[in-house]
Amino acid sequence: MGDGRAVPNRQLERVGHFKKLKAWQHARSLAVLSKAAIGRLPASERDGLADQWRRAAYSVVLNIAEGASRRRAGEFRRYLDIARASLDEIEAIIDLTIALGFFRPEELARLEAARDECARTVYGLLRKMSDAPKRTGSL
């Protein structure tokens, strides 16, 4: 249709769907906050810890987005499990950076709160999916 009206296409309706998920919104905030903290790590950690932290933070937001585009709930759940593991990795990284003296706990309090909120929403979404009746069709 060349008149500017939306094409009634189920695939087009899914575009942007992941952005409506609270878990994705929290993950996006966590990635942004992580990037700022990563930039404050010593140069000696740029290729090691910084890179691992960056990959873990991006993994959370990207796996939620990719999983939301899957047709089956089981596939989405698999991506949420990967995001959950990355959230645990970020928790360990935060703890390690404090233990190594790169940050004081209060410097990462906002980031830690964002990680915790993201984890709660991902866990809640996983629980909700587990409690839902099993279907073999799409979400």
Image: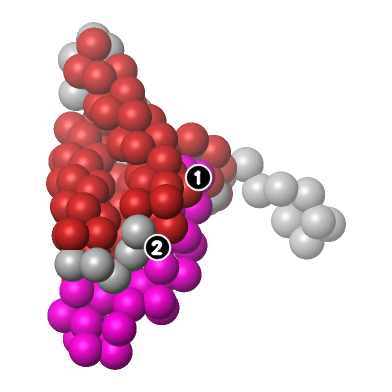
| CA–CA distance in space, label 2 to label 1 | 14 Å
| Left or right for 89, reference 103 | left
Where 8 falls versus 123 (above or below)? below
Residue type beneath disc 1: Gln
Q: Position of residue 36 (x, y in %)?
A: 46, 70
Mark 1 — residue? 25
Q: Position of residue 109 (x, y in %)?
A: 42, 47
Quadrant that contains the N terminus: bottom right
94 and 132: which is toward the camera? 94
On residue 34, the disc is 2
Q: Amino acid type of disc 2?
A: Ser
10 relative to 73 in the view: left or right: right
Question: Toward the viewer: 48 or 126?
Answer: 48
Q: Main secondary structure of the magenta part?
A: helix
- Going from the N terminus, do you reach mark 2 or mark 1 first? 1
Residue 101 figure quarter: bottom left
* Residue 86 appears anywhere in the view: no
Picture layout, residue 96 above or below residue 35: above
Q: Does residue 116 appear in this view?
A: yes
